[in-house]
Image (tube, helix red, strand yellow):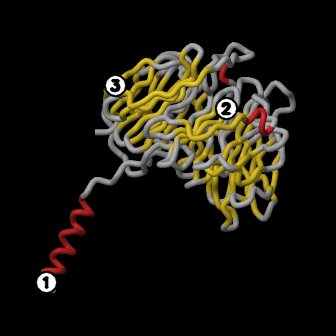
Amino acid sequence: MKNILKIYLFLYLILLNSPVKAEDWPGFLGPKRNGQAFLNIETFVKEPQIMWSVNVGEGFSGPVVFAETVFLHHRNQNTEEITSFSLKSGKVNWRKSFPTNYKDDFSRGDGPRSTPAVNKTAIICISPDGKLRALNNTNGELLWEKDLVSEFESNKIFFGFGSSPLILDEKLIVMAGGNKAGCICINIKTGTLIWKSEGFKGSYSSPVVAKFNKQDCVILFHRDGLSVFNLTDGLNLGMFPWRARFDASVNASTPLVKDEEIFLTASYGTGAAWLKFNQGKFEKIWANDTSLSCHFGTPIISNGFLYGFHGRQESGPEFRCVNLKTGEVLWSKDGTGSGNLIKFSSHYLLLAEDGTLFLNKFNSTKWEPVFSQKILNNACRAQPAFSDKFLLARDGTKLICLQITP
């Protein structure tokens, strides 16, 4: 009996002292769709080193990571390419290309805008012209393909399709943004449609899943506002109108959900709203256009405070900290421009549009940087990814891997 207890104690100590497996970054805004990286990281290197760098094509699609493999959707001349890289070395595992003649109507770049989603079954990507594709993530073989425009009468809005897909086990959630279906749920293995919602116009925001009244729901911030759907059958459980009063505008920031409450933010004179959703009804806790009007970057929540960008991208937005419960602006920082965020337990990474990376401490009283470092060049709008010790980030020509933690 004593020997058995010793064995159990030995195994327990091994488990207790073994390194915790780092999470993958399997889609836009990470594993929890809120910008949250692995929770227990507290220590960071003072001067992050580039482990590898590769030339890539254009686009605003962010990198994703699954099983120590990095995937990127980008464009090289007249082809869209999904490329698989080794996380540790940057070595190319495979490439899969598709011809494209997409041209942006406003000369804002012709590459992909939507960030892929990946799991053990497939990697899913959406082209700016509405081609939804599933590829084998080990070799790039095309598993199935759908044309959102022809099948659901979807519209590319202004700058092409930019909402990022979401994988939940074997279900795939996509904002189709069409007359025949606004949101669709697909079997990821077969491409078979499981359900579709009523039609509505899409946006550049991305779907989120959360529980309300113990029910799994899809939360979607589309062209006209926020809709909540039953994950099982697509039943519309409620809709909250929230959009600019003029046509030349978009909703782009992804909703944040905390304890059955939802945070929305948009630019173009629309602003932010903190909502409570219960039994199909929305209650405004607060709403205004002065707290946190995010043009495209999604803010993060930490300890009851919002951190994010306020103002139009072309006008030079501020970075702010806001009291989530009241909407009170606690501090503002000029000069960062637009950017994207990754959240840790007590720190956050801010990758500015000009390619400057900041590591800051969460502080509701002031901007508190630990370091800043220029890592990329201008037009750095893609959401970065974090996995293991590494930050994956891109601009219009390069994908880099930096070691962020010891």
Horizontal arrangement in the rendering, residue 119 relative to residue 8 (left or right)? right
Horizontal arrangement in the rendering, residue 272 relative to residue 397 (left or right)? right
- Crowdedness of circle 3 by 10 Å Cα count: few (<14), some, many (20+)? some
Distance in Å between CA atoms under marks 3 and 2: 31 Å
The quarter of the rendered structure image containing the N terminus is: bottom left
Q: Which residue is at 69% across, 25% downward? A: 312
Q: Position of residue 219 (x, y in %)?
A: 70, 50
Label 1, on which residue? 2
Amino acid found under the numbered disc labelled 2: Lys
Distance in Å between CA atoms under marks 1 and 3: 51 Å
Q: Which mark is residue 52?
A: 3
Q: Position of residue 35 (x, y in %)?
A: 53, 42
The quarter of the rendered structure image containing the C terminus is: top left
Q: Disc 3 or 2, which lies upstream in sequence? A: 3
Amino acid found under the numbered disc labelled 3: Trp
Horizontal arrangement in the rendering, residue 14 relative to residue 41 (left or right)? left
Label 2, on which residue? 131
